[in-house]
């Protein structure tokens, strides 16, 4: 399943699993939404949670009509999130560091591997996360062997190693926890085991610019203005 079914020379060796992050000293786990629609509650209106300026979470939603989401659902949800007047921050590590420092209580959707990185540096151990279903999962790190490469078989052997349990363990250890959900026993596979997932596919890469533009418009994110 790591191989692109239409372009079998391309393999995706890693996945980003999106989770909700929070400061457990500022908000209890019971009060953190258990559904994505939970962020639309009245008590979360006006600067109560963070939305990243790069709408990767919303792009993930658009890729999953089979999970009851898709383009239309994403745009409607983004419009409703906009009405909540969230805090806009660029960069997941920066936002998570702010949450760990107590500046904000809640992130509406960030990457699991970034949460673990900041947790390791969190002296107060207040940064926590919750897995919300359907769990958005984004393919990342696509790799390929070029037809004109000088050593195609060496390249294939390298990719075979990266896809093996040993190679996936290296990715989990040093990225960290960013191996493939299709690798049994990997950290992302264990995180989403038994849960409903919203998994993007290789075919979605060509649609990402369109979905990003749709999300930016619906969220009302600030845009650069050209001076004439």
Image: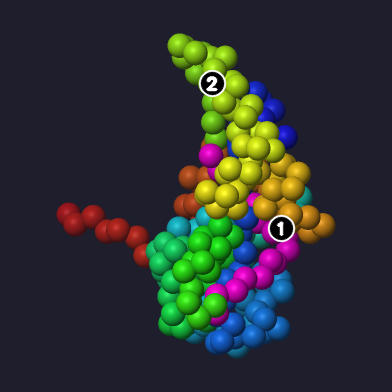
Helix, strand or loop for disc 2 = helix
- Name the N-terminal-most of marks 1 and 2: 2
Q: Count neighbours of disc 2 (C-alpha within 10 A) and say few if under 14, some if 14 to 19, many if 20 or more.
A: some
Point out residue 42 in the picture as x, y percentages from the top left corner: 61, 86
Q: Nearer the viewer, residue 28 or 171?
A: 171
Q: Quadrant of residue 101?
A: bottom left
Question: Label 1, label 2: how many angstroms apart (C-alpha)?
Answer: 30 Å
Disc 2 target residue: 155
Residue drawn 46% across the image and 83% down it? 102
Disc 1 target residue: 191
Residue drawn 34% across the image and 60% down it? 223
Q: In the rendered view, would you say 20 is above or below 191?
A: below
Q: Split into 4 quadrants, where in the image is the N terminus?
A: top right
Q: Are marks 1 and 2 in contact (CB under 8 Å)?
A: no
Q: In the rendered view, would you say 157 is above or below 85?
A: above
Point out residue 144 in the picture as x, y percentages from the top left corner: 54, 26
Mark number, residue 118: none
- Check residue 204 for magenta coloring: no
Residue range (magenta) = 126-141
Q: Is residue 55 visible?
A: yes
Point out residue 46 in the picture as x, y percentages from the top left corner: 49, 84
Residue drawn 63% across the image and 41% down it? 168
Helix, strand or loop for disc 1 = helix
Farthest residue, direction right: 194
Q: Nearer the viewer, residue 136 or 99?
A: 99
Point out residue 5 in the picture as x, y percentages from the top left corner: 69, 28
Left or right, 68 with respect to 129, comes to right
Q: Nearer the viewer, residue 148 or 72?
A: 148
């Amino acid at each position: 399943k790591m191989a692109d079914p239409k372009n079998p020379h391309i393999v995706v060796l890693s996945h980003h699993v999106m989770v909700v992050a929070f400061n457990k000293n500022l908000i209890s786990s019971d009060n953190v939404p258990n559904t994505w629609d939970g962020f639309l509650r009245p008590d979360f209106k006006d600067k109560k949670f963070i939305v990243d300026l790069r709408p990767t979470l919303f792009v993930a939603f658009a890729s999953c009509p089979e999970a009851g989401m898709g383009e239309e659902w994403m745009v409607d949800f983004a419009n409703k999130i906009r009405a909540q007047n969230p805090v806009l921050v660029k960069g997941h590590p920066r936002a998570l560091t702010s949450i760990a420092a107590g500046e904000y209580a809640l992130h509406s959707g960030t990457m699991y591997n970034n949460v673990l990185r900041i947790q390791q540096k969190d002296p107060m151990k207040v940064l926590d996360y919750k897995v919300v279903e359907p769990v958005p999962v984004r393919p990342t790190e696509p790799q390929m062997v070029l037809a004109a490469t000088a050593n195609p078989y060496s390249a294939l052997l390298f990719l075979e190693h990266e896809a093996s349990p040993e190679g996936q363990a290296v990715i989990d250890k040093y990225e960290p926890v960013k191996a493939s959900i299709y690798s049994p026993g990997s950290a992302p596979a264990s995180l989403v085991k038994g849960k409903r997932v919203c998994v993007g596919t290789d075919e979605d890469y060509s649609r990402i610019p369109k979905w990003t533009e749709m999300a930016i418009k619906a969220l009302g994110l600030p845009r650069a203005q050209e001076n004439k």
